[in-house]
């Protein structure tokens, strides 16, 4: 279904682009001016395609692209009394907050993760940065949030209190780096919108006996890196 949707939208885009150039060749349309005024339609088109490709189950990125395209289109057509940028960035910030409030649930993994506690990790930074070196030999998990800032969390000298623990990470217009011992397994469950979660951790040792860390990661206009 997703493949068919992508082919349909690609076909519509190519047909539309060909029609524009055809009208230009016939002298019915000034192609340069048309593209200069209506290029934001491409963002709107991509936003609609993104939502349709997921059967409208994940619409966050699509709505943001439609909003950006709509603001620039109205500005190009002199419909808005203000510049596009003066309206765009506050709108994106508002959408970012709404996405955090109504963000999709984590998809879940085949193995049930333990509940999150903040006894061993409870970090929050805004417009700032911080380093957290966790050396607890009874680590039970926790939460860390970076908003317009950065966090560096080092768990390489920690040991789990039990067989597994859960950490919840949230990066909004910022970044989080977390370093995990090489002899731990890492299971990542992530939500990302115009951001990314990169798991670079490579476990070593005997698979059946390794401790397991569950990471629930949310990245919004930011990034979360999981490393050894």
Image (cartoon, rainbow, N blue to C red):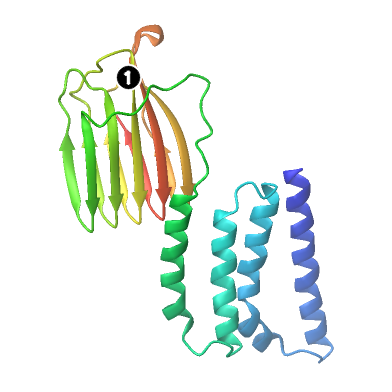
Residue 166, horizontal then vertical, whole percent: 35, 27
What residue occupies the far right of the structure in this picture? 26
Q: Identify the image quadrant of residue 142.
A: top left
For the image shown, how many numbered marks are present on the structure? 1
Residue 180, horizontal then vertical, whole percent: 28, 28
Q: Identify the image quadrant of residue 73.
A: bottom right
Assign the N terminus to one quadrant of the image.
Answer: top right
Q: From the viewer's perspective, tell me whether residue 6 is left or right of residue 191.
A: right
Q: Taking the image as drawn, is residue 180 in sight?
A: no
The residue that label 1 is drawn on is 184
Q: Taking the image as drawn, is residue 146 in sight?
A: yes
Residue 30, horizontal then vertical, whole percent: 72, 90
Q: From the viewer's perspective, tell me whether residue 197 is left or right of residue 69.
A: left
Residue 38, horizontal then vertical, whole percent: 65, 80
Residue plotted at (29% across, 13% down)? 162
* Circle 1 Cα neighbour tier, 10 Å, few/some/many (<14 / 14–19 / ≥20): many
Residue plotted at (51% across, 39% down)? 105
When the figure is inspected, residue 42 is found, relative to residue 27, above or below; the finding is above
Residue plotted at (38% across, 33% down)? 200
Q: Nearer the viewer, residue 89 or 206?
A: 89
Assign the C terminus to one quadrant of the image.
Answer: top left
Q: From the viewer's perspective, tell me whether residue 163 is left or right of residue 35.
A: left
Residue plotted at (49% across, 47% down)? 103
When the figure is inspected, residue 72 is found, relative to residue 26, above or below; the finding is above
Which secondary structure lies at badge 1? loop
Q: Identify the image quadrant of residue 211.
A: top left
């Amino acid at each position: 279904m997703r493949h068919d949707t992508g082919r349909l939208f690609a076909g519509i885009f190519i047909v539309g682009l060909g029609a524009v150039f055809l009208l230009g060749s016939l002298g019915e349309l000034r192609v340069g001016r048309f593209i200069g005024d209506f290029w934001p339609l491409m963002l709107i088109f991509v936003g609609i395609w993104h939502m349709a490709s997921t059967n409208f189950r994940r619409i966050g990125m699509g709505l943001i692209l439609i909003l950006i395209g709509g603001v620039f289109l109205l500005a190009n057509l002199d419909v808005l009394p203000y510049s596009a940028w003066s309206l765009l960035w506050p709108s994106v910030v508002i959408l970012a907050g709404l996405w955090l409030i109504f963000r999709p649930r984590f998809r879940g993994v085949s193995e049930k993760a333990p509940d999150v506690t903040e006894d061993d990790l409870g970090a929050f930074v805004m417009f700032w940065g911080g380093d957290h070196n966790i050396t607890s030999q009874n680590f039970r998990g926790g939460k860390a949030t970076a908003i317009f800032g950065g966090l560096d969390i080092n768990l390489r000298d920690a040991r789990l209190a039990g067989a597994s623990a859960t950490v919840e990470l949230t990066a909004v217009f910022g970044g989080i780096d977390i370093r995990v011992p090489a002899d731990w397994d890492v299971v990542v469950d992530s939500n990302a919108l115009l951001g990314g979660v990169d798991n670079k951790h490579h476990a070593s040792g005997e698979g059946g006996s390794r401790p397991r860390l569950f990471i629930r990661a949310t990245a919004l206009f930011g990034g979360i890196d999981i490393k050894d």
